[in-house]
Image (cartoon, rainbow, N blue to C red):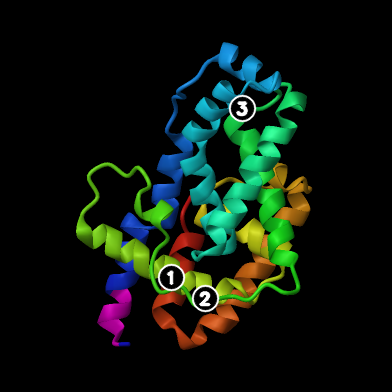
Amino acid sequence: MPAQERSNLAGRSRHYGLVASARREVSEGGTAYDEVTIEACRRGERDALDVVLRAEAPGVERLVARLIGPGADVADVLQQCLSAAVVAFGSYRGEASVRTWLARIAVRTAYHHLRRPERRRRAPLELVRSAAQAPSGARSQEEELATREILARVARHLDALRPKMRLAFALHVLEGRSIDEAAALMGATRAATKTRVFMARRTLVGRLRRDPALADWLRAEEACP
């Protein structure tokens, strides 16, 4: 790939890319339910569960897609997450927001999925629907295409990582979460999570020597505050 094209891709991904859109998604507030609805969920009331899980499902789906990569498996893992949430809602005590609580379930479910020995990865040919539909304001077609290209190419390389390294990297780099937040979602120490991100980056740098544009993107994201 010509140097100018590599530079253009890295520049677009920095400006429009995964971390920027993920930070918007994480920070966008507001819920379609209140504490009365949450209490009804704890009692197992179907209508309340439907309201909460419908509101949170798109965000959980986007998170799952970033953790395991785009593909048909996303729908299966999402269903497992929501089913686990229905079962576990009775023990939800509100120490964290519902969104954070569901994110922890998603991380745990994704980890078990990534560990499956029979898992067969398929090269992603397109951006998963959930990421394409992520709330992003007035994003242009160029922005969408830049993000689509980066997501597909990153996913091909993440399969080289061990599950915990991959999750830590996806949460911190692709999702734009802090090391502390990534550690909390994984149930790990800050030191362990930071080490996993470092090791993931080192592994990816070695693999990306044959993909200079993606290496440029990784270095650019490393430099993000």
- The reply to whether the C-beta atoms of the residues labelled 2 and 1 are less than 8 Å apart is yes
Mark 3 residue crowding within 10 angstroms, few (<14) / some (14–19) / many (20+)? few
Q: Which mark is residue 193?
A: none
Secondary element at image label 3: loop
Q: How far apart are labels 2 and 1 at the CA level?
A: 7 Å
Tally of numbered discs:
3
Residue for badge 3 = 97
Q: Residue at x 70, y 41 (%)?
A: 84
Q: Residue at x 53, y 15 (%)?
A: 34
Q: Position of residue 65 (x, y in %)?
A: 52, 57
Q: Amino acid at mark 2?
A: Arg
Q: Residue at x 58, y 71 (%)?
A: 158
Image check: 107 left or right of 173? right
- The reply to whether the C-beta atoms of the residues labelled 2 and 3 are less than 8 Å apart is no
Secondary element at image label 2: helix
Instruction: Inspect the magenta stretch and tell me whether residue 150 lies in it.
Output: no
Q: How far apart are labels 3 and 1 at the CA level?
A: 31 Å
Q: Amino acid at mark 3?
A: Ser
Counting residues from the N terminus, which is met first, the one under dot 3 or under dot 1?
Answer: 3
Q: Position of residue 7 (x, y in %)?
A: 31, 74
Q: How far apart are labels 2 and 3 at the CA level?
A: 33 Å
